[in-house]
Image (cartoon, grey):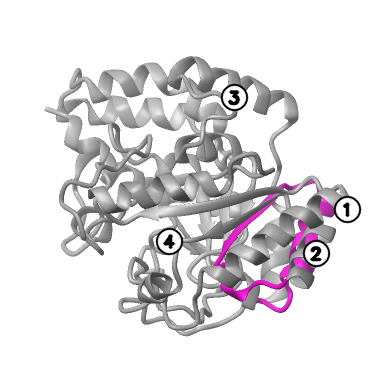
Amino acid sequence: MFDIDFFQNVTTLKKKIVAGDFFISDADEIEKELDALRTKKPKVFNIETTNYCNMKCIMCPRTELMTRKNIWIDDSIFQKVVEQIEPHSNQDLEKFWDFIENEYGLSENEPSENTFYFRVVSRCVILHGYGEPLLDKKIVERIKVCADRGIPTYFSCVPANLTIERAKEVMDAGLTVFKFSIDALDDEWQKRIRGSQNNFDASYRTILDIIDLKKKQGYKTLLVPTMIALSEDATSRQMHSKFMELWENKDVFAYVKSQDNRWLLEEDEEMENRSHYEPQYCEYPFTSITVMADGSVVPCTQDYDTEMALGNVNEGKLEEIWNSEPYKNFRRMHITGDFPKGHKCKERCDQKKLYQYLK
């Protein structure tokens, strides 16, 4: 979930920034305008319920870079966060989706990662981080806690960890969106990409069974098979096409996702990032927060070691953290570029920053 009002209201200013209409000397003015546009009650992008994982994905920083301890989120932390979440109204979402269709030309059925971001991520609290959500023994309870408060939820899983019984449990609990990560169309390549416990054939059959289960039980859960494009050579493009063909005429929203965080894994220098963020700058400092399993509040999902923690839910309310001096300083760094030496945002992230557009 993110601040859809900010996303709409900042459009004119953002276009001027990206066009190079501002100078670094305008930093104070830009900071003032952005602060006036952002909500003072933060939107929660995702809650990491665990950072345990049984996969060794080559594209995930968890595999080789993450050093923090593996834990499950404490029930009290999860409850504190959920109690502070205010979901978007259907009316506000419809207005936002109309804006997206007019501004980006993205219809509801366009099979792309940007459609998924604007249509799904905008309204759902994501219940995964740097772990496998199906390893969280309380994931069903957590979904239900959110559903009882009218909070839409979504998580992405590796289908090799999935059984039809587990799928029924999470859909019974009220999971809004159920995403399945598939990165190859044979067992050998699936194991190469995500580790020895992964597979394709069994996973594909399980997803087909879940599609049938959804139809029989009348579940409203949106099923989302997705594949990350690790390369764009001819062989990979052919595989992406075959992947999409697998889901034709099935009740799913399937898409191929371009890879971001390419500083981590670069298999193909010609690969394109097709995310809506590519032609603009990072807006996470202004649109949402992420809560990690230990309660740390970080500004984005890429902080795998919580090195940019700006507070903790055990020490203060989300609104206090969001409007705190550390968060204010962090936003200003994105505007001026005055990051301390070694800061992840400036030195270890491939997303453009606002200051890079200032003359």
Task: Say whether residue 175 is left or right of residue 332.
Answer: right
Q: Earlier in the sequence, mark 4 or mark 2?
A: 2
Q: Which residues are magenta?
A: 136-163
Identify the residue position indicated by label 3 in the image: 97
Query: Residue at horizontal 46%, vertical 36%?
Result: 114
Q: Is residue 352 above or below residue 102?
A: below
Between 17 and 137, the residue placed more toward the observer is 137
Q: Quadrant of residue 268?
A: bottom left
Q: CA distance from mark 3 to mark 4?
A: 29 Å
Name the kind of residue labelled 4 in the image: Asp
Determine whether label 1 and label 2 are within 8 Å by CB.
yes
Q: Distance from label 3 to label 2 (Cα)? A: 30 Å
Tag 2, which secondary structure? helix
Mark 3 vs 4: CB contact within 8 A: no
Residue located beneath label 1 in the image: 217
Judged by depth in the image, the label closer to the viewer, 3 or 1, is 1
Answer with mark 1 or mark 2, whichever residue precedes in sequence: 2
Quarter of image, res 326: bottom left
On whether residue 159 falls in the magenta region, the answer is yes
Q: Which residue is mark 4?
A: 183
> Residue 236, position in %: x, y?
31, 52
Q: Are marks 4 and 1 in contact (CB under 8 Å)?
A: no
Query: Separation of disc 1 and disc 2 at Cα?
Result: 9 Å
* Amino acid type, mark 2: Lys
Closer to the camera, 96 or 187? 187
Indicate left or right for 196 with 279 as reference.
right
Q: Between disc 3 and disc 1, whose residue precedes?
A: 3
Label 1 element class: helix
Q: Residue at x 84, y 59 (%)?
A: 172
Say which mark, if any, is on residue 168: 2
